[in-house]
Every structure is written in structure tokens, then in C-alpha cells.
Image: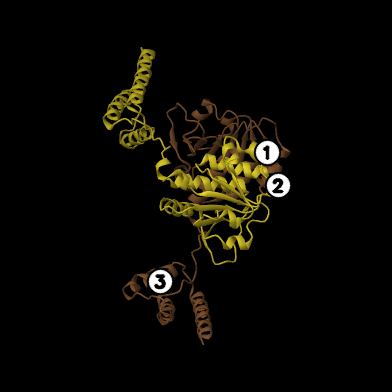
Chain colours: A brown, B yellow
Amino acid sequence: MPKNNHPVVILVQPQMGENIGAVARAMGNFGLSELRLAAPRDGWPNPKAVEMAAGAESIITNATIYPDFMAAMHDVHLAYATTARPRDMEKRVVEPRTAMAEITGHSASGNKVALVFGPERTGLANEDITLCDTLITIPTSEENRSLNIAQSAVLIGYEWLCAQSDVMQVTRELPDIAPQEEWHGLFSQLEGYLDAADYFRVVHKKQVMWQNLQNMLLRSRLSAQEVRTFRGMLRALWERRLGEKS
Amino acid sequence: MPKNNHPVVILVQPQMGENIGAVARAMGNFGLSELRLAAPRDGWPNPKAVEMAAGAESIITNATIYPDFMAAMHDVHLAYATTARPRDMEKRVVEPRTAMAEITGHSASGNKVALVFGPERTGLANEDITLCDTLITIPTSEENRSLNIAQSAVLIGYEWLCAQSDVMQVTRELPDIAPQEEWHGLFSQLEGYLDAADYFRVVHKKQVMWQNLQNMLLRSRLSAQEVRTFRGMLRALWERRLGEKS
């Protein structure tokens, strides 16, 4: 997907410069770059927006200003508006994850998509919502539903990035988990020590006790090198014990 | 799952009261309630934390204070630490979504899980990370990797709530989409009007033109009532046209 077909973010009548900056920061964190402001309350440029952008200053300096929401939407094919409160309107409402899966598809098909946020205090007016195709509502706990625009932008941006399948590669499982034969060697050694130490005492309980021990150790998912380290440690313990006895 | 087995959030040496408050707010938004502070830099209580909590003040007033991270972990079975930078340590690293799926399972099994955040400036010290089982890294764009603790807490809380499958029910598809027979009635009516108006002109092009028109209209996903409204509108248009001709 060409970068210039990422969704654009449109802030409708944004009030505080700090919030514009926080939105830009979230955009930068999650790979969005085009910001449009429709009738920002305090005019433009706004130094507080630059201050809060924290690494995303270029998004602020490249932001484009429009006299109203409709003008900011001139080339947009599909608009998704984030709304806090439910609206009594015949609009689809989806969660951020669903929205971003859809938007990824729309963008890949060459459609320009807008992510729309309303004024901080009031949210979008109904006539602005009418211009939008779909509403995004972020799931929250029933008791504390209020998210500010900075929080919302972080979540929307994050879900956008997550929906770009090629970037979800930060997971790192432990490398180089020891193969079973390494464990077998460790277990033989340990069982020998424990038998010699009469650890299991009651013969008919040994099987369960020994299984439990092996399971505990296996859960550590040691690497082959770590198994060897562990065996060295066991040997050291065992030989000291012999030394004490002698 | 009993509420008191939700994960606890542990802030290790948190620096700014505002950030403690922002974390509490995010916890409240996403259904987490137990906050522990290990050695907060500016002491406790901290009025700035209450100010920023925005509806989650009870999380601040019920927060418990510990002299160090180990003390705050006394009853924790499994700890997941959110870290920004990759660590040169043999720890599993997972994304928030994977982490929260795992933690939901651990919590349901009766294990107490901690979500751990380090000091704002430096992040967790290596000896604190050693106490944690798994690291959570939030995927970001390569160019802007820096997330503050408030942003991280929002994302972690959100993924926790999303992992509680019974709450992801904010989606609302349009209710009452008109059944095909309603559409058939509309299309018959409209085709009659258009034929009568000689709209299609070139006979062999009619099929494609008419299909395109129907597809356009179907995409609107009207309800049965809306189809009737639309038909009334068409009828009004058509009858006015006749009136003009006469």
C-alpha cells in the first residue's frame, strides 16, 4: 500500500493545542502521517501543539487547515468517526479492531479513508456525523466510559498499526529451547542423584513425585546451554554433598 | 472470574503524580482497580495523582504503597512487564494482545497476575525485570517508538478489556435490513419509471447500466421502512415529472 494512501486524521474544531499535539504524537507512534484540522478554535499555527508532539513535530508542521469539516473531507471516500456516546442515528457502529480491518481493505483498494475526531468538550455535531459512514466506539468499562481525545487517538492508531499484518512481529519466543535429549540427560543425572540420596523414600510414590519434578523443570523452557549449566550446578551440589558426608 | 482476581497494576518508582493519575484513569476506563506503588518518588498521597484520575479517584485513594518492587510482588504469581526498549535478557516478549489472552487464562485459574510499569525516565532496572515472567512490547512505527506511561497504560488496559470476551459487544450492525422482496418491489417500480423515461436509450447497454444502478442502491443497506420511504420519494419525483410534461 503506498504510504500516501494511509488514512488521514481529521480533527473537527479541535480546542486545545496540547490535544492536537498528543494526537500527532499518537499518529507518529503508529505510522499515520496526514493530519487535517477543520476550524481549530485557537487558530494556527499553535506552539502548544508542537510542544506536545514529542517526535512527531513534522506531522504538526505539515498539517493542513480547512474552514470546516466538509472542506476537510473533499477528497475522502469513506469516513470513520470516533464517538464516545451512542448516537440515535442510523449509522453502523463498530469497534476499533473491526474498523481498522475494514479500513485496511478500503485503503488497499485505493479509497481515501478519514479517521474523524470531534471537539473535545462536545464531540461531533450530528450534522458532521451525517457525513461519516461508520462510527467507531471504543469498548470501556461501564463505570468509567470517558476517554479523552489523546487516549482515543492512541487506541485508534494502535489498532491501525496492528491491522497492518506485516508489522506485528515484535513477539519473541525464547530461542533455542533445549531438545528432549538434552532434558533426558539432565533427568537421568538428577534421578541418579535423588535415588542415591534416598529422596523418594516411599517406592510407590516415586513415579508421581518424579513426574511432578520433571514437569516443573520442563516448564522453565531452558535452552540447551542452560540445561548444561543446570547440570553443572546439580553436579556441584551433589559432589559437595558427598564431600560433606565423607 | 471474581473481580478481586483481576490483574493488579504495579508502578515501580513512579516519578510524576500526573502519570500515576493517568494510569489510574486508564485502569478505571478498562475495568482494572487494584493499583500498587513501589517507592513513589514524590511520596504519598500525591494531589496531582488525584487531579489526573478523572473519575478513577477511588483507585488512587485505595492504592497501596510498598517500599520496593519485591514487596509489591509478595502475593503475585506471574508478572508481565511493559518495556519500551528491547532487553538483552532471556525473557519471553509478547505483544499486548497475546499477553492479555494469557493473563485472562492465568487469572481465571486463580493466579494473581501483575502488570508492571517502570519509572518514566529510565524504565525498569534489570534486577526488577528479572522478577518478571514475560515482557510486553507494544508495536509501534519504527520512526516513533517512544510511548509515555499514560499511553502504554491505555493500550494495556484496553487489551485487557478486549480479552474479556463478554464485553466486546459494542458493535451494532444496522438493524432490520430490507429483505430482497422489498428491494424487488423498489427495483420494479424504478425500472418501470426509467423505461418509461427512456433513460436507458441504447438497448444493448441497458443490462449493465441497470445492474450498476441496482448495486449502488443495494449497498445503502436500507431497512424495509427506508425502502418504502425511498419508493415514496421516487413516486413523488416521477409524478412531478409527469406533471411537468403535461
Q: Which mark is residue A246?
A: none
Label 1, secondary structure: give it. helix
Separation of marks 3 and 2 at Cα, in angstroms: 47 Å
Q: Residues within 10 Å of mark 1 (few under 14, many from 20)?
A: few
Farthest residue in the front direction?
A245
Q: Earlier in the sequence, mark 2 or mark 1?
A: 2
Check the residue under mark 1 and report the chain it is in.
B
Query: Can see residue B140?
Result: no
In the picture, measured across the screen, residue B38 lies left or right of residue A167, that is right
Can you give x and y, in whole percent of width and height, for residue A7 in the image?
A: 54, 43
In the picture, measured across the screen, residue A66 lies left or right of residue A140, that is right
Q: Quadrant of the C terminus of chain B?
A: top left
Give the amino acid at mark 3. Gln
Separation of marks 2 and 1 at Cα, in angstroms: 11 Å
Farthest residue in the bottom direction?
A246
Label 2, secondary structure: give it. loop
CB of mark 2 within 8 Å of CB of mark 1?
no
Label 3, secondary structure: give it. helix
Check the residue under mark 3 and report the chain it is in.
A
Q: Which residue is mark 3?
A: A214
| A192 over B159 or under it: above or below | below
Give the amino acid at mark 1. Pro
* Location of residue A182 (image quadrant): bottom left
Check the residue under mark 2 and report the chain it is in.
B
Q: Which residue is mark 2?
A: B42
Looking at this view, is A48 or B135 the one in front? B135
Can you give x and y, in whole percent of width and height, for residue A196 in the image?
A: 42, 82
| A149 over B15 or under it: above or below | above
Q: Which residue is mark 1?
A: B47
| A240 over B230 or under it: above or below | below
Query: Can see residue B115?
Result: yes
